[in-house]
């Protein structure tokens, strides 16, 4: 029996997943949380084989927090289950140590297969994304941007796109405000724009945010 924890903001997601898996004797949803602050306690108190985690979970500020969880609870496999762009976020998440990335547009049967595969030690990602990453010469524009941006730059870009100021982002990520300014300048350069409005618009066009 594979024991799963679902970490998502929306009750409808929890209900849908629990309803789907109630007829599967090999997988059991043993915990549901709606805030990242609850995660550590759950992992300490229950045996969790697979964590199904939304990157936009309330309280989750950075992929580096996911990395810390993976380090502290190495026996738990993490699958990112999110609406964020798979082309951009899946490779970054895999680099951080997660075992898979499944977009929320996929059927729950794909989630079932993904849970089974990660417990067998496999990495789960959309086949198209896998092929595109392997074929560097045929990369899409979005993927070329991905290869330019670090995890931290992608995070800063997300917060800038949400309308947050440099000092607010610094507080969230626990970084110096000057460091955020440096990331912002790098983003302007890498995305070949000269102002914040164009930066955000380009990020949205390329589905980075």
Image (cartoon, grey):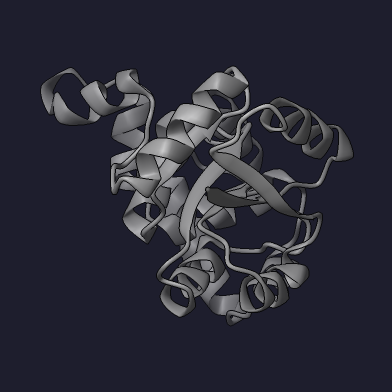
The residue that appears at 50% across and 23% down in the rendered structure is 110
Residue 72, percent across and down?
47, 79
Residue 112, percent across and down?
53, 30
Which image quadrant for residue 43? bottom right
The residue that appears at 42% across and 42% down in the rendered structure is 100
Query: Left or right: where does residue 147 sit relative to residue 180?
Result: left
Residue 172, percent across and down?
70, 71
The residue that appears at 77% across and 70% down in the rendered structure is 38
In this rendering, does residue 160 appear at all? no
The residue that appears at 71% across and 77% down in the rendered structure is 41
- Look at the picture and state if 1 lies above or below 76: above
85 and 190: which one is in front?
Answer: 85
- Look at the picture and state if 123 lies above or below 69: above
- Look at the picture and state if 184 lies above or below 16: below
- Look at the picture and state if 46 lies above or below 93: below
188 and 97: which one is in front?
Answer: 97
Query: Left or right: where does residue 28 sit relative to residue 37?
Result: left
Query: Left or right: where does residue 198 sit relative to residue 33?
Result: left
């Amino acid at each position: 029996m594979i024991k799963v924890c679902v970490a998502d903001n929306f009750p409808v997601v929890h209900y849908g997943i629990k309803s789907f898996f109630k007829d599967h004797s090999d997988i059991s949803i043993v915990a549901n949380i709606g805030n990242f602050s609850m995660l550590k306690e759950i992992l300490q108190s229950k045996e969790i084989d697979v964590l199904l985690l939304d990157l936009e979970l309330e309280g989750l500020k950075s992929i580096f927090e996911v990395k810390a969880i993976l380090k502290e609870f190495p026996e738990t496999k993490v699958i990112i289950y999110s609406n964020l762009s798979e082309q951009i976020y899946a490779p970054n998440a895999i680099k951080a140590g997660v075992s898979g990335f499944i977009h929320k547009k996929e059927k729950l049967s794909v989630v079932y297969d993904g849970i089974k595969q990660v417990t067998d030690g496999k990495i789960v990602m959309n086949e198209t994304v896998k092929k595109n990453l392997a074929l560097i010469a045929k990369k899409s524009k979005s993927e070329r941007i991905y290869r330019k941006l670090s995890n931290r730059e992608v995070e800063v870009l997300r917060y800038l796109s949400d309308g947050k100021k440099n000092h607010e982002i610094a507080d969230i990520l626990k970084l110096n405000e000057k460091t955020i300014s440096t990331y912002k300048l790098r983003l302007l350069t890498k995305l070949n724009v000269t102002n914040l409005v164009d930066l955000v618009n380009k990020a949205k066009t390329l589905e980075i945010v």
